[in-house]
Amino acid sequence: MSPLQWLLVVAACSVMLSSAQAAEVRGTVSVEYQGLFKVDTSVQSYAVSVALFPGDGQPVKLRAPRVEKIEIAENRMRPAFLTIQTGDQVKFVNHDPVFHQLFSLSPSKPLSAQLAKAGGPGVTTATAQFDQPGTTHVFCRIHNKSYARIDTVETPHLQTLQPGEQFHFPGLGPGRWRLRLASPGAETQWVDVTALTAPPARRFSLVSRGGGTGSARLAGQTAVENLYQH
Amino acid sequence: MNIEQKNTLFVISLVLTVLIAVSVASFLLVRDHVATTIEGDLERANSVFIEAQKNHFDNLLTVARSARAEPSLIAASLTGDITTVRGMLDDLYPRPGADFMAVYLDAGPGGFAGAGNKPHYTSPQVLGSAALIGLVRSLAQGKTVAFGNALLYDSWLQLVAIAIENPFGGRIGALVVGKAFAQADLQRLRQLVYADIAIFSGNAVLASSIDNLQPRLHLLNGLSTPEAGRTLDTESGRYSIRTLPVLAHEGSKEQVANVLLAVPHAAYWKPYQVLGENAFYFSLLILVLAGLFGIAISRRSLTRPIQLLARATQAIAKGDLSQNVSLQRNDELGQLTVSFNAMLAALSASQNELKQSRKRFRDFASSSSDWLWETDRNGHFTFVSSSVSDTLGMSADTWLGRTPTEVFPRSNLTELMALLRSVEQRNDGFKDVEIWVRARNGEQHCLRLNGVPLVFDTKFSGYRGTARDITKLKRDEKRMVVLANQDHLTGLSNRSRFIQDLNHEIRRVEQHGELGVLLLIDLDHLKLVNDTAGHAAGDQIIVQVAGLLKRASREQDLLARISGDEFAVAYSAMDEPQGIAKAQALLERINSLKPKYGGRTLNISASIGVVNFPSQGKIPVELLAKADAAMSSAKSAGRNRVHLYNETDMMRERMDNQLVWKDRLLEALEKDLLQLVFQPIVAVAGGRVSHYEVLVRMR
């Protein structure tokens, strides 16, 4: 079968499926900064996770658990924002030639793990299973700026995308659904949506109240001097 | 330069002197004050600098303690893995207040990691440098904090080291926090210590508030101990300086760098300079005003009056005596003016007197027959009064500048010239010097000169005196002599002259042992001739007889008419017989004379007395008397004869005279012919008659 024929078959199947389950939710999420501080354009924008929950008790079947990976390189955890389904595991892999001491004090998943240096003796990975929905903040005891946030949600409908990218949840049962929009730099937002057949793309906006301008380096004595100047 | 200019110059000099003196005094005071202030400020800068460093290190210690309290630092340190620590530091840094952080694990060589705002801070060479290791080691001696300095390439870092402790106890490492001393810190510090600061190491300037310091560093490197009064000259001026060492850590002898505290002299001088300039201009203004005021006062009170007097004296010097200085003042100048005017009046009066005196002199000089002259030391005439032209017919001007010899070239004036030039005898004048000169017209003049020497300052300078033309006097004198000695009718000597000459002849004859004869010739009856034929006839006879006698005499013979009809002849070198023969010869020639008068021939005869000399007398009067007696005897014997004198002649003569007078006196008494005459004697002074001379006269 030629590639053209394959394309035609897929297109035909898609048309058939869409006609059978027409309801879907789609849209874009942007992060709008409304904080006290000015927008710091130098700060990279975090990813946005979109999770869809049934609003009218529609049945949702969780998918099989997965093992997500957070890799530590150059004293940083990447991805720094991860949204997983309940029951998924997260594996922390140390690629650095230094020790890392991960910990979490979040109630959803308290955590403490020491990762040995890569290439040296000792265990360089740690795996944790996230059974409780919630937000878990993971830090490194040694590296102050090493941080990761893991959102655990009880739904298989979840997508992680960059702000402005379109999300699309097809094949949903018609009715009301609830969208959970989260980003490390913004407040988590719950939005009720209705799954429709070929709905227009919705536009959502998350309010960011953190991550504005704020240099780690203090202005020093000048700040004090300025207290007493016009 | 006149007195006003001098006075102005004096006032200006005075003002300038005061100004300079005040300026110098002020300068010295200010210089001392500035030097003291500078030293004080350097001392203060030193203290403030150290206080500032204390604060600096306090801040650094706070930073270090806050960093040490980071869990990440403890956690990383506890791993004992330096790479982990380095990673941790990368996260921990930057921290405010720290340019450099390093962790030294107690894990042996190489157990250090660093982070900083400059790449080379973290290099093993820096971290393992003796300065940092030494600082860390100083902690090992029990201190909890160690302060130090390090020179990391071109940066001076102030360092604080504190121990990293295991929560369970024990030190597991050291945290070193550093702060680089930057130019900005220097500027802040400079404002704080109020002095210029420079940080230098060797020949490198790390930070400096003084421009272009580098070329001067070699002057500073030799200095160690602080010493008061040390200065440094740079392009931007002179500084008083103090150097402080920057040690690696407490107790270390390693000198990381040097701190130079410098106080610029210019900053201290500036206010005084401004003040000085203002004060200078102000005092200059005041002093100029004072000077002008002083000059004005001086001109009014001193210069002007003196100028007034000076102008008056100049006018007086030019001969204007009409000047009168009018100055109403009560001071010395007023007195001077009064005295001046008085002197001027006196001078004017004496000038007038002098004029009068000169005029009088001129009048005298011109009217006098005498004329005045003056010569210099060489005998040149310097003054001759104008009356000389009247006398000699020569203008006085032609005499000036010429000697008498030059004025009268044809006259022999050697003696006079010798007198006029006789320098040695200048104290004595000369009197009645007579000279004969020949005037231009050829006439001989006799001049009589009197002279006194001119002496100025004991120096002989010539003669001055009078001169008189005595030519006429001389001629008169000559005539008088002639008149006194000569008979005017015959030209023969008169009686007095004859007596003088006879006296000489008697002496001469006596000396030579010669003989002489005196004849007294009396013409007979000459009275009769006079009475009958007139005096002219008598005179003619006398003249002819005189001529006869003259012709008959030798040159050496003396011949005289001693009275109206008497002639005397004295022959020398002649004895008595020759004398008688001579007398006879003469008598004959007189008899043969036979003069004619009025158409008739007159017969004349003479009686001649002869006397010898010196045998019969040595006194001329006596001889004449004897000759007269002999002559009388000849007359008595009948006239026209010669009689030689003998003693009886004299006696008879005397008796004749006595008899005559006796008869006459008796006759006068009888006829009452005697009468008294009173001659009044009057005193010249007073004109009074003092007494009378009584004479007896016979009528």
Image (tube, helix red, strand yellow):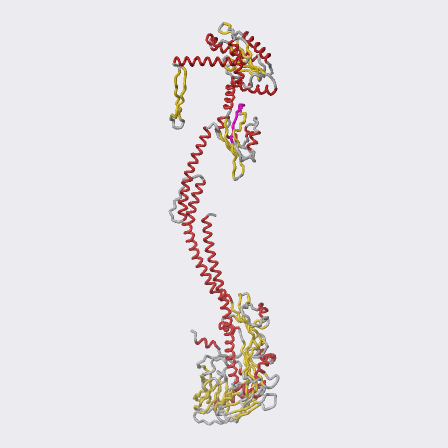
The boundaries of the magenta stretch are B440-450
The question of residue B582 being in magenta is answered with: no
Image x and y of residue B233, in percent:
55, 66
The secondary structure that dominates the magenta segment is strand
Q: Who's the residue at 48% across and 6% down the image?
A: B598
Q: State the residue lying farthest toward the top.
A: B600
Relative to the observer, which residue lies in front, B432 or B58?
B432
Towards the viewer: A57 or B502: B502
Is the residue B410 above or below the residue A223 in the image? Answer: above
Dividing the picture into quadrants, the one containing residue A127 is bottom right
Tag count: 0
Q: Nearer the viewer, residue B81 or A112?
A: B81
Of the pair A182 and B194, the residue shown nearer to us: B194
Residue B679 visible within the image: yes
In the figure, is residue B678 to the left or right of A74? Answer: left
Q: Residue at x 40, y 47 (%)?
A: B335
Where's the C terminus of chain B, which quadrant?
A: top left
Q: Is residue A154 visible?
A: no
The percent position of residue B168, horizontal first and vertical second, equals 54, 90
Residue A38, given in percent of the width and then of the height, sits at 46, 79
In the displayed structure, would residue B459 be above or below residue A121? Answer: above
Q: Is residue B194 above or below residue B441?
A: below
**In magenta segment, residue B445:** yes
Residue A65 x, y percent position in the rendering: 53, 93
